């Protein structure tokens, strides 16, 4: 028996229905197409039935839950349009770390960042309105600066929880700099 002939579970049907609804919200399916495909998805018996409903839709790339970034003496930097994992572990022995979340894709409300810095510092740039908790971060011979970034969770705002340690470096959290003369 092929895999396409195997019977599906309720969870498989629900996952396909969610993919179809997401495609509709992106404008890839019309209302009528969505209704027709949902009816088939919710009554599907085999994987072949479900696969036929989503083969013409793009496959979503899952965001890893945990990502580890390591460097011995280089500069670690993430900026622009990048997918932020739920948990980010950063280890740098002699280099600095810059994490710019202002244009990043953050698909979950809480981001845990664990820093292990020996001789370097870290800078985290939050999206506008984002908040951060640095209570679990320790800097032995440096300072921790959060400038005007609030530390309490707020509804609808990205909440970044920073933990870890910097032996001879510090941590700076801020919002993106305002650009002058932009329209």
Image (cartoon, grey):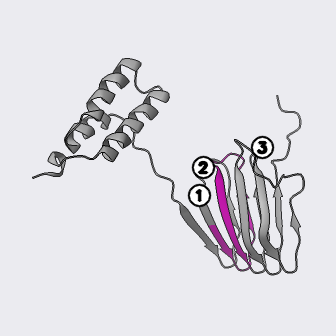
Decide which of 45, 125 is in the foreground and name it: 45
Residue in the image at 32% along x and 34% along y: 56
Q: Which residue does the numbered mark 1 point to in the structure image?
A: 86
Helix, strand or loop for disc 3: loop
Q: Which mark is residue 128?
A: 3
Quadrant showing the C terminus: top right
Q: Residues within 10 Å of mark 1 (few under 14, many from 20)?
A: some
Q: Residue 39 sits in which quadrant?
A: top left
Q: Earlier in the sequence, mark 1 or mark 3?
A: 1
Q: Which residue does the numbered mark 2 point to in the structure image?
A: 108
Q: Which mark is residue 29?
A: none
Q: Residue 144 sits in which quadrant?
A: bottom right
Decide which of 94, 175 is in the foreground and name it: 175
Helix, strand or loop for disc 2: loop
Point out residue 146 in the picture as x, y percentages from the top left corner.
Answer: 86, 59
Compared with 54, 2 (above or below) is below
Q: Earlier in the sequence, mark 2 or mark 1?
A: 1
Q: Residues within 10 Å of mark 3 (few under 14, many from 20)?
A: some
Q: Earlier in the sequence, mark 2 or mark 3?
A: 2
Point out residue 120 in the picture as x, y percentages from the top left corner.
Answer: 78, 75
Q: Is residue 151 visible?
A: yes
In the rendered structure, the answer to whether residue 181 lies left or right of residue 76 reads: right
Q: How far apart are the two marked residues, 1 and 3, measured between alpha carbons?
A: 19 Å
Residue at far front of view: 10
Check whether the beta carbons of the residues at disc 2 and disc 1 lie within 8 A of each other.
yes
Stretch in magenta = 89-117
Q: How far apart are the two marked residues, 2 and 1, measured between alpha carbons?
A: 7 Å
In the rendered structure, the answer to whether residue 3 lies left or right of residue 39 reads: left
Residue in the image at 19% along x and 42% along y: 46
Decide which of 173, 155 is in the foreground and name it: 155
In the rendered structure, the answer to whether residue 19 lies left or right of residue 109 reads: left
């Amino acid at each position: 028996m092929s895999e396409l002939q195997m019977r599906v579970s309720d969870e498989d049907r629900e996952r396909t229905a969610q993919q179809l609804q997401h495609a509709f919200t992106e404008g890839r399916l019309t209302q009528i197409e969505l209704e027709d495909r949902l009816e088939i998805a919710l009554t599907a018996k085999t994987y072949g039935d479900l696969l036929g409903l989503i083969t013409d839709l793009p496959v979503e790339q899952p965001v890893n839950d945990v990502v580890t970034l390591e460097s011995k003496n280089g500069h670690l930097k993430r900026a622009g349009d990048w997918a932020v994992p739920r948990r980010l572990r950063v280890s740098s022995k002699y280099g600095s770390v810059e994490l710019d979340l202002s244009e990043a894709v953050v698909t979950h409300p809480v981001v845990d960042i664990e820093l292990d810095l020996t001789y370097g510092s870290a800078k985290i740039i939050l999206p506008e309105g984002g908040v951060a908790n640095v209570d679990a971060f320790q800097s032995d011979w440096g300072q921790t600066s959060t400038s005007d970034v609030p530390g309490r969770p707020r509804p609808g705002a990205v909440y970044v929880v920073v933990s870890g340690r910097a032996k001879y470096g510090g941590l700076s959290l801020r919002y993106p700099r305002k650009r002058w003369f932009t329209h």
